[in-house]
Image (spheres, rainbow, N blue to C red):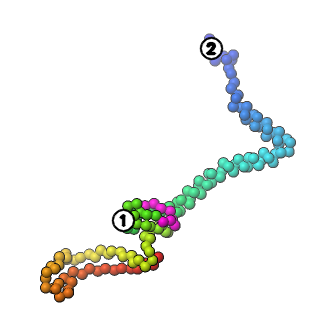
Amino acid sequence: MNQNSFRNLQLNLSGLNFWLTLLGIVWILGSLGLGWLVKSFLILLGLIIITPVIAFFVFRWWLQRNLVEAACPVCAYELTGINGTELRCPNCSEPLKVEQGQFLRLTPPGTVDVQAVDISQEQPLERPNFLSSEMMDGSTGGTTIDVSARAIDN
């Protein structure tokens, strides 16, 4: 016996009943002069659907402008932060502030921030002899170290 015969054909319309009922209610409200209610409901439904999509793209745009990925100025550890916030480096625990796309050290007012400068040497330095007669009279032993410091006002 063929199971695909027309006698065994059943139509499953259970999902269609909901849509037919909804269409009937909308048609009755429209014919009674309450079409404004249906339109306002559809506008509200559209706003509920489109608002999260717009918010997602606005958040991505804001994050792209304010997310900073740079190195810690103290230990060169790669960090991520948001402009205008303060955080601590997880590597060296230095308090940092994120400003204008870079990380800056948070230092109390009056702190002098010193940056070391590498000076290339033409001849190797000799280790000073602390027992020599030159050191007894107050000279430096012939080794010169050039240091430059700059005070940064916060």
- Closer to us: 100 or 93: 93
State the image quarter where residue 5 is shown: top right
Residue 31: where, in percent of width, then height?
A: 85, 41
- Closer to us: 93 or 140: 93
Residue 96: where, in percent of width, then height?
A: 44, 67
Give the residue number, with chain letter if any, for mark 1: 75
Residue 14: where, in percent of width, then height?
A: 70, 29
Callout 1 amino acid: Cys
| Residue drawn at (13%, 82%) of the image | 132
- Closer to us: 21 or 74: 74
| Residue drawn at (64%, 18%) of the image | 4
| Residue drawn at (52%, 67%) of the image | 84
Give SS at disc 2. loop
Residue 144: where, in percent of width, then height?
A: 24, 81
- Decide whether residue 84 is among the magenta residues: yes
State the image quarter where residue 90 is shown: bottom left
The residue carrying pointer 1 sits among few (fewer than 14), some (14 to 19) or many (20 or more) residues within 10 Å by Cα, namely few
Quarter of the figure with the N terminus: top right
